Image (cartoon, rainbow, N blue to C red):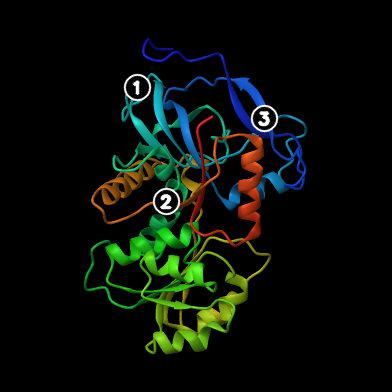
Amino acid sequence: MNDTYDIPATMPAVAYRTSLPVDDAESLVDVTLPTPKPGPRDVLVRVEAIAVNPVDYKIRQNVDPGGEPKVLGWDAAGTVVAVGGEVEFFSVGDEVYYAGALDRPGANSRYHVVDERIVARKPATLSFTEAAALPLTALTAWEGLFERLGLRTGALEQTGALLVTAAAGGVGSITAQLARALTSLTVIGTASRPESVDFARRMGVHHVVDHHRPLAAQLGEVAPGGIDFVFSTTGTDHNLTAYAETLTPFGRIVAIDDFDSLPLGVLKAKSISFHWEFMYTRSMFRTADQSMQHHILTQVARLVDAGILTTTATRDLGPVNAANLRAAHRVQESGSAIGKTTLTGF
């Protein structure tokens, strides 16, 4: 495929063949698969590090591949070793990071093909491991803040308060950083344990409230004028009434979590708008602006290299193999993860 890298015909990967509890040794298994070849707009990446997100275990639990090996993983950093014939942004040898596409094989493999339009050069100041922690959550946070909620980067006149739930989690921790660095909003984060409160503060929140206690009264204390925006990463259905009570008229909510139903009628009196953020929408529907994710990740890399943003990687569980990935899935399934869990090397 090129003269620079010796690309083998097969590669190690981690996959699952049927939906099983994470403690079952067959829930994730080591496999050998054919090395994929890039399509016209694809780059082939030699994966050096990955990160694990809730989407990984949710798919493992709910999507049964019927015995065929299905590879998960939607956060990766590595080196471009081959490019498709129509690739414009990258050359062989570029170090990149990306979150991938939900409707293509994941990156829990030594080599991975991904559309160049959702890839960017990794931050030069970060290791592959530190960089792998950022793409999925940074894209979610950026799109949620600056596209769905309509915030403007660097708009110092835009005052008010933003609530970020689970501010010590993967999405919450980068959302807090972006909001603190690029807006003039007061950033309020929810956290409960001492270690998560400390991490949320280090990520940039001005005030912390306890999500195990009623939110409305706590928010009234730290933001007596009300809150203007909510970035709801979890518990949206349980917290919607509190959001409606504390949001100012014409406030905005963006949510990323899953639930069966939502009583949106409580938002009508204040004309509060509700928005979804799903990072995979652009890649799933091949939207005309897919390359926005390339540009967002490029901006994030510049902010990291300027010392404005930092990685949210907090624990690395070793090489990418089935045993270590099962451990990473356990961390995610516990619901108590702080920052991002990574794996490095094969």
Judged left or right of residue 209, residue 67 is right
Residue at x 38%, y 58% (from the top left corner): 147
* Closer-to-camera residue (331/177): 331
Q: Position of residue 329 (x, y in %)?
A: 64, 48
Real-space Cα separation, disc 1 to disc 3, in angstroms: 28 Å
The answer to whether residue 214 is visible is yes
Residue 92's mark? 1
Quarter residue 85 falls in: top left
Callout 1: SS: loop
Amino acid type for the residue under numbered disc 2: Leu
Q: Position of residue 249 (x, y in %)?
A: 41, 83
> Residue tagged by mark 3?
30
Graded by Cα atoms within 10 Å as few (under 14), some (14 to 19) or many (20 or more), the crowding at tag 1 reads some
The answer to whether residue 321 is above or below residue 204 is above
Amino acid type for the residue under numbered disc 1: Val
Q: Position of residue 73 (x, y in %)?
A: 56, 40
Graded by Cα atoms within 10 Å as few (under 14), some (14 to 19) or many (20 or more), the crowding at tag 3 reads some
Say which of marks 1 and 3 sits in front.
Answer: 3
Callout 3: SS: strand
Quadrant holding the N terminus:
top left
**Most distant residue in the top direction:** 3
> Residue tagged by mark 2?
139
Residue at x 37%, y 10% (from the top left corner): 3
The answer to whether residue 30 is above or below residue 164 is above
Say which of marks 2 and 3 sits in front.
Answer: 3
Callout 2: SS: helix
Mark 2 or mark 1: name the one nearer the start of the chain: 1
Mark 1 or mark 3: name the one nearer the start of the chain: 3
Residue at x 36%, y 22% (from the top left corner): 86
Real-space Cα separation, disc 2 to disc 3, in angstroms: 29 Å
